[in-house]
Image (spheres, helix red, strand yellow):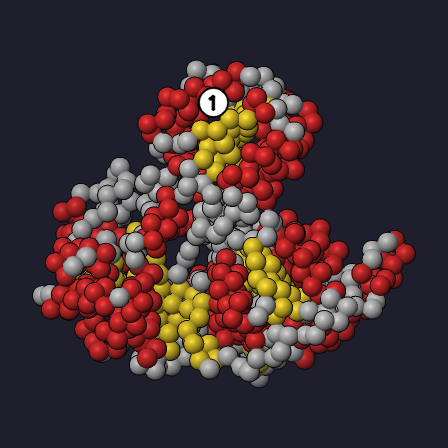
């Protein structure tokens, strides 16, 4: 079993912590993990891409190959389409619906949604709104992990434990908010 | 013990476990996390780790530690080695005593760099051995071994990292740690002095060591040859070429023979053995076609050698599992077939909202508005994003500190007005010496030091001196105090700032303007911490 994932969004949205939590949960489930990310220049409000590979066997490449991603998890709708070349023909896109419009030529949002809907089985959810209901907009990455959780090779409990471990230092209320955000994503239809 | 580490962190942990005493570096993507990890662990583990003014001072400090018998680590990005090159190349002739390991993190694909130079080339030039890991686990093991090799041969040793190893996370098993070396000053005096007489002796000795190191490379477990009987194709992998070859190998109809090179100098006998047993060779190496050029030479005689030189492998950018797949002659895999070209546009990086650099650039542009021909030079850092719209404020980005010297030269050639822009840390790293040249000749130019009190691009490391000490420093270099000005880059100060810049442009000599406001990101972080 190998599960390949593309995790993407815009610099500052929390893509790397999204990747870190799935990686942590997978490791606690005794799976091999390779998680590749890029720091520096590319983080300054630009497009951000992380590769995450989870397997019960040996993993050679840190990078996902084209046509082999089981899942694209995106913090932003246009970004969810940028890396479709990586997606398997039957792969799934899970994305936040709220756009980040920090460029002048952002495409027509309805056209973006239509393309996302064209990927069969795709999920486009109002992650930021759900996170805000759970207590903080900043937890929208946890909403996405929740929404993607049925497709991940780890169970919900390991993911929740990874969320607890990650936010423990920030206090119980931050842990609670993030767990609530996770559940909101998981229960979303 | 097993833990999840970035490649950079695996290297740092290995150095600690190898008995590290002193670590020096200058921030630079993708190497920065090594020193950050070391600084965080230095107090508890009882060693010294610190940022330095530049890569050259860092390297020289490590040399001092080695002379004292202690193990030392130096960290930098690939272009940093250009700055440290004088110390580094000469140090190969020394009698390295305590293990001296330098990690240089290359950035093929230029994710966050101005070029994609290959550190192996500089290492070969200096005749210094190189370890090149392909996993985080190997990074750990090779770093431990690198200290041993450095002490065994009495040479500095390089670990060449690349972005995809440095910034990739995996589980790493650490081994038992080793105590630090005792203080033990080198007794080989001529081995540490490069006078012509001693340097001649040391150079001959290095050439002798090179032979021993090649013999070591032939039998190193890091250079593995797998000869497959009857195979026509021989693959040589270097660095991440290994991972991408293995990723695709199962799809090949015939298993090729394979030599992986993880330790340099090149194992010539192993290469010869592979060459003799196959009909042709494909070289898959991350970075420059260094192994390939050695194999082909100028004449290119012999069996066909494929790789970056004949176009089988892409010549620029980093290797990926997909371009290696293509080089292996394997078909593309099908992927989700939806055309999204009409709904995806590039999203380039930009200065953060509220960034002081944006206000500095707005004022500089306003001050230069009425001049038909001006030049604004710039430098390496976040502020290089001022090259992009909406700012489009700067015209040169070359290397750490170049903005100052280039402005002087352009002014002396006759351009007017000339404004140089440089960050606080970059100025201390490589701009200060050029400013001394300016003081000597008083060129008609205005230097704007964009002082955000941090090394911003690499994540907010401290600048060597606080903002308050910059003005005395500039005065001390001899700049006329009447033309040392300070502005605060804020939107509400725009008119005033523009006026001050104009005044200094109208002064036909050297001016230095400090544009001082803290980086918005570090300010936010501090505010969060004090909450």
Quadrant position of residue B342? top left
On-image quarter of the C terminus of chain B: bottom left
The percent coordinates of residue B107 (x first, y second) are: 51, 55
The reply, left or right, for residue B272 in relation to residue A188 is right
The percent coordinates of residue B522 (x first, y second) are: 39, 48
Is residue B348 in view? no
| In the rendered image, the vertical position of residue A76 relative to residue B97, given as above or below | above
The reply, left or right, for residue B389 in relation to residue B443 is left
Letter of the chain that mark 1 sits on in the rendering: B
Is residue B437 in view? yes
Between B340 and B273, the one nearer to me in the picture: B340
The percent coordinates of residue B95 (x first, y second) are: 78, 65
Query: What residue did someone put label 1 on?
Result: B501
Residue occupying the point 28% across, 40% down: A103
**Residue projecting furthest to the right:** B197
Residue occupying the point 32% across, 63% down: A17
């Amino acid at each position: 079993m190998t599960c390949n994932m593309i995790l993407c969004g815009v610099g500052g949205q929390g893509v790397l912590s999204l990747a870190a939590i799935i990686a942590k949960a997978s490791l606690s489930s005794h799976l091999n993990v390779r998680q590749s990310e890029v720091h520096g220049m590319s983080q300054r409000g630009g497009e951000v891409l992380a590769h995450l590979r989870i397997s019960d066997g040996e993993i050679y490449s840190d990078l996902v190959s084209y046509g082999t991603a089981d899942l694209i998890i995106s913090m932003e709708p246009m970004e969810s389409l940028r890396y479709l070349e990586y997606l398997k023909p039957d792969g799934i896109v899970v994305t936040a619906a709220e756009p980040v419009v920090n460029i002048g030529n952002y495409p027509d949002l309805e056209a973006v949604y239509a393309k996302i809907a064209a990927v069969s089985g795709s999920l486009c959810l109002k992650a930021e709104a759900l996170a805000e209901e759970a207590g903080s907009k900043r937890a929208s990455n946890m909403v996405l992990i929740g929404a993607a959780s049925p497709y991940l090779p780890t169970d919900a409990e390991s993911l929740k434990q990874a969320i607890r471990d990650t936010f423990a230092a920030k206090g119980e209320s931050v842990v609670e908010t993030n767990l609530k955000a996770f559940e909101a994503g998981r229960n979303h239809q | 013990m097993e833990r999840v580490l970035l490649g950079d962190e695996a290297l740092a942990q290995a150095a600690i476990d190898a008995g590290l005493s002193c670590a020096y570096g200058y921030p630079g993507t993708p190497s920065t996390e090594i020193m950050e990890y070391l600084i965080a662990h230095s107090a508890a583990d009882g060693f010294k780790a610190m940022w330095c003014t530049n890569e050259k001072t860092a390297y020289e400090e490590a040399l001092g530690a080695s002379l004292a018998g202690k193990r030392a680590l130096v960290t930098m990005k690939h272009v940093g080695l250009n700055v440290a090159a004088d110390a580094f190349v000469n140090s190969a002739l020394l009698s390295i005593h305590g293990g001296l390991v330098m990690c240089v993190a290359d950035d093929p694909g230029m994710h966050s760099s101005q070029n994609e130079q290959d550190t192996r080339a500089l290492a070969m030039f200096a005749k210094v051995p190189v370890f090149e890991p392909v996993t985080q686990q190997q990074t750990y093991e090779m770093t431990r071994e690198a200290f041993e090799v450095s002490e065994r041969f009495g040479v500095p040793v390089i670990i060449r990292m690349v972005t995809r190893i440095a910034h990739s996370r995996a589980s790493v098993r650490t081994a038992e740690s080793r105590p630090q070396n005792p203080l033990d000053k080198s007794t080989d005096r001529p081995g540490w002095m490069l006078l012509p007489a001693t340097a001649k002796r040391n150079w001959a000795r290095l050439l002798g060591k090179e032979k021993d190191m090649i013999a070591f490379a032939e039998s190193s477990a890091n250079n593995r040859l797998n000869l497959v009987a009857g195979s026509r194709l021989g693959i040589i992998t270097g660095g991440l070429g290994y991972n991408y070859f293995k990723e695709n190998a199962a799809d090949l109809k015939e298993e090729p023979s394979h030599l992986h090179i993880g330790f340099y100098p090149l194992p010539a006998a192993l290469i010869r053995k592979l060459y003799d047993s196959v009909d042709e060779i494909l070289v898959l190496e991350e970075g420059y076609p260094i192994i390939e050029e050695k194999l082909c030479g100028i004449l290119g005689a012999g069996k066909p050698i494929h790789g970056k030189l004949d176009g089988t492998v892409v010549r620029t950018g980093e290797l990926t599992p997909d371009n290696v797949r293509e080089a292996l002659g394997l078909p593309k895999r099908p992927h989700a077939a939806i055309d999204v070209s009409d709904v995806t546009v590039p999203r380039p990086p930009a200065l953060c909202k509220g960034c002081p650099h944006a206000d500095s650039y707005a004022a500089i542009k306003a001050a230069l508005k009425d001049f038909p021909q001006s030049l604004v030079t710039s430098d390496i850092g976040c502020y290089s994003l001022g090259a992009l719209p909406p700012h489009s404020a700067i015209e040169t980005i070359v290397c750490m500190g170049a903005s100052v010297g280039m402005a002087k030269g352009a002014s002396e050639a006759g351009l007017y007005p000339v404004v140089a822009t440089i960050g606080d840390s970059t100025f201390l790293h490589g701009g200060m010496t050029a400013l001394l040249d300016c003081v000597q000749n008083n060129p008609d130019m205005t230097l704007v030091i964009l002082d955000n009190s941090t090394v911003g691009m690499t994540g907010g490391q401290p600048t060597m001196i606080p903002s308050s000490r910059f003005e005395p420093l500039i005065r001390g270099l001899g700049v006329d105090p009447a033309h040392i000005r300070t502005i605060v880059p804020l939107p509400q100060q725009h008119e005033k700032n523009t006026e001050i810049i104009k005044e200094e442009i109208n002064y036909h000599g050297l001016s230095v303007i400090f544009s001082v406001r803290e980086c918005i990101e570090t300010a936010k972080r501090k505010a969060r911490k004090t909450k």
